């Protein structure tokens, strides 16, 4: 599965997702029709939430309803360092990191392109 993000500022998107988040660049398919790179985001899963579940998780992770139809979640080894790197790269914090009832730690951010992100570390 691939997730395709169309970003308003390509250079900012590359700096954020590749350089700050650390996703490995696998290919550059830039051509006369436009710019595109392929980043390795690891194994993908899709979680389907109903509205009640989304509200519940938002309350736990962000203290209020903040999710939209799509939220990207990335497992990181050091949540605090990864969060700070992304904040330094232009993300905004949706909330402070939390320890959810299911364990680990989670942090909600919004990327410069507006995409909602969850960083999580396993217990």
Image (cartoon, helix red, strand yellow):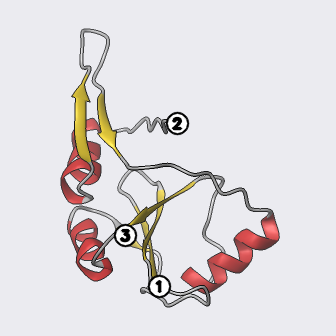
Q: Quadrant of the C terminus?
A: bottom left
Q: CA distance from mark 3 to mark 2?
A: 27 Å
Residue 4 at x, y = what percent?
Answer: 46, 35
Could one spot residue 63 in this view of the protein? no
> To which quarter of the image does residue 83 belong?
bottom left
- Residue 97 horizontal side relative to residue 19, left or right: right
- Write the residue at 28% across / 82% down: 80
Provide the residue designation for mark 2. Answer: 1
Closer-to-camera residue (29/89) = 29
Counting residues from the start of the chain, the first of labels 3 and 2 encountered is: 2
From the viewer's perspective, is residue 93 above or below residue 9?
below
Residue 114 picture location, percent across and down: 45, 54
- The residue lying at 43 percent from left, 35 percent from top is 6
Residue designated by label 1: 104
- Residue 91: x and y in percent read 33, 65
Q: Which residue is mark 3?
A: 92
Query: Earlier along the polypeptide chain: callout 1 or callout 2?
Result: 2
Q: CA distance from mark 3 to mark 1?
A: 21 Å
Which of the marked residues, 3 or 1, is nearer the chain's N terminus? 3
């Amino acid at each position: 599965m691939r997730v395709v993000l169309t970003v308003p500022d390509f250079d900012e998107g590359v700096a954020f997702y590749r350089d700050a988040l650390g996703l490995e660049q696998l290919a550059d398919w830039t051509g006369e029709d436009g710019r595109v790179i392929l980043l390795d985001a690891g194994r993908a899963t899709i979680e389907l939430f109903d509205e009640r579940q989304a509200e519940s998780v938002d309350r736990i992770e962000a203290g209020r309803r903040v999710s939209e139809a799509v939220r990207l979640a990335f497992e990181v080894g050091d949540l605090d360092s990864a969060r700070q790197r992304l904040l330094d790269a232009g993300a905004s914090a949706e909330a402070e990191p939390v320890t959810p009832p299911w364990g680990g730690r989670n942090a909600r951010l919004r990327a410069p392109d507006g995409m909602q992100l969850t960083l999580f570390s396993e217990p």
